Image: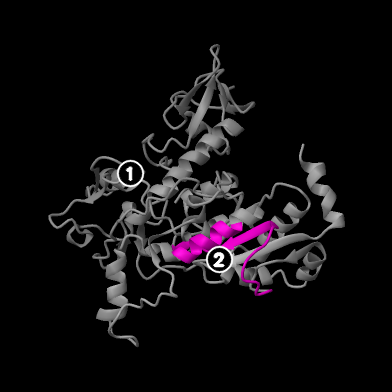
Amino acid sequence: MSATFQLDGEDIPFTPGQTIMQAAKAAGVYIPHLCWHPDFPAHGSCKLCTVKLIDAHGGRFGSSCTMEAQAGMSIENRTAELDDKRRTLLQMFFVEGNHFCPSCEKSGNCVLQATAYELKMMSPHFDMFYPDRPVDASHPDVLLDFNRCIMCSLCVTASRDVDRKNVFAMGGRGILGRKIHINSESGRLADTDFAVTDRAANICPVGVILTKRKGFAVPIGERRYDKAPISEQVKEPTA
Amino acid sequence: MNAPMNAAPVATKKLKVATTSLAGCFGCHMSFLDIDERILKLLELVEFDRSPITDIKHCGPCDLGLIEGGLCNAENVHVLREFRSHCKILVAVGACAINGGLPAQRNHLDLRDILEEVYQTEAGVSHGHIPNDPELPLPLNKVHPIHEVVKVDYFLPGCPPPADAIWKLLTDLLAGRTPTLGHGLMHYD
C-alpha cells in the first residue's frame, strides 16, 4: 500500500519525490494552474496552484507544483478561500495583458480562459492596463502575439531543454517592462532557427505562439473547453 | 435576508427594465432578441423604459439596467451615469462593457494618429478633415469598461452572451436569486 496524503478530505496516493500537483494529476484531481506542465520541471511563478497545508498552527500557503507530498499531509485545494485568491490572481493576469477572447484563435482551447471559467471570473474587477505589446509576424509559419503572454516561461523551457535552440528568454523588470525576448540580433523570430515543429511552438497555454494559416479550425461548440470544463479534463493529455 | 422583500413586488407590480448600447455593436441586443418567444413571458413580468425597443431617450427610475458596450466617448459616460443613478441593479452585458472589447483594441494607439489616418491620410470617402461638429460627442483617449466609471452589480460575459445566458440572468434576477451561469453559458467569446 502506497503512502497517501489528504486533498480536500480525499486520500491521494503518491510515490516519494512526487509533488502535490503531480500526485493530484495522477489521481485525476484538478488543482488550478497556468505555468505548470507535466512534461517540465515546475516553474512556480503563476501561483494559481497555491494550496493550504493544514498544520498545528492553522495553515500555510504553498505552491502545489513545488511542494513535495508527504504521508499524512492535510491539504486544502478547492475551498472558497483559495478559489477567491485564485480568481483575484486571474483578474490581475487579465488586466495586465490584452486578452480579447472574441478575436483570439486560441479561444476555446486556452488554459487561461478555461481556468477563468472554472473559477467563475465574471469581470476583470481592476482597471485595465491596455499595454502596448507589438506582435512579431516575421516568421513564415508562426505568429507571436505577445498581448496574451502570461509569462509562464514554458516556451523558454521547451526551446532550451527540448529543442536545444534557446529561442526565447524572459527579461526586463516590472509589470510593463518584463517580457519574452527573442534570441536573435534583430530580436525577430524570423532571424532564429525556430521551426513550427519545435516543442516550443506547441507549448503555449494561451494564444501567443500560433501556427499561421490554421486559425479558427475548430468551430465554436466543439473546441476543447466547450465540451467540458478544465476540471473534468485532468486525465486528458496537456497540449 | 433580502429575499422576501425583493420577492414580494414581483407578483404585484411589473419591474422596470432599461437597456442601452454604448460603444457596442448592438450584437448583445440582438442576442437578447434571440430569447425568441420567451420575450412574451418576459413582458408579463417587466416593462421596458429606455431601450431600443421603446425609443425612449432618457431613463426614469428603473429596477434593472442592462448596459452593452464600453465607453469610447463623452456621451457614453453621460448615459452610463444616467443609468447608474436611475437603476437599482446595473448589469454589464457582453465583452465590450466588461473589458472594452473590440473598440479597446485601439487603446495602444494615439487617438490623434488614428483620426488623422482615418480621415486625412488614408484614401476614403471623407478626405480632408477630422469631423468636429459640436453635436458629435468627443472621443475618449482610451476605451474603458464600464466598471472603471460606475459600480456594476453583475457581469454577463460573452461576445455576445448567448440568449440562454441572458434569459438565465433575467429569470434569476426576477426570482430574487443571485444570477449564476454554468458551463456552456459562460463564454468570453
Nearer to the camera, A149 or B131: B131
For marks 2 and 1, the one nearer the N-term is: 1
Occupied quadrant, residue A13: top right
Look at the image and tell me whether residue A67 can be seen: yes
Q: Label 2: few (<14), some or many (≥20) within 10 Å?
A: few
Which residue does the image show at 68% across and 74% down from the upper left?
Answer: B53
Residue A153's tag is 1
Of helix, strand and loop, which one carries label 2?
loop
At x 55%, y 16%, the residue is: A58
Q: What residue lies at 32% left-to-right and 52% top-to-bottom?
A: A200
Specify the quadrant that holds the N terminus of chain A: top right
* Residue B77 x/y as whole percent: 49, 60
Disc 2 from disc 1: Cα separation? 28 Å
Q: Residue at x 57, y 43 (%)?
A: A119
Query: Which of the chains bears the disc numbered 1?
Result: A
Q: Is residue B63 magenta?
A: yes
The chain letter under disc 2 is A
Label 1 crowd bin: few (<14), some (14–19), many (20+), radius 10 Å: many
Of residue B44 and residue A190, the one placed in the foreground of this image is B44
| Helix, strand or loop for disc 1 | loop
B91 horizontally vs B108: left or right: right
Q: Residue furthest front?
A: B134
In the image, is A81 to the left or to the right of A107? right
Across and down, in percent, residue A34 comes to 44, 43
Residue type beneath disc 1: Ser
Residue A27: where, in percent of width, then height?
57, 35
Q: Is residue B59 magenta?
A: yes
Quick check: B27 above or below B84? below
Residue A223 visible in the picture:
no
Q: Which mark is residue A220?
A: 2
Magenta span of residues: B54-83
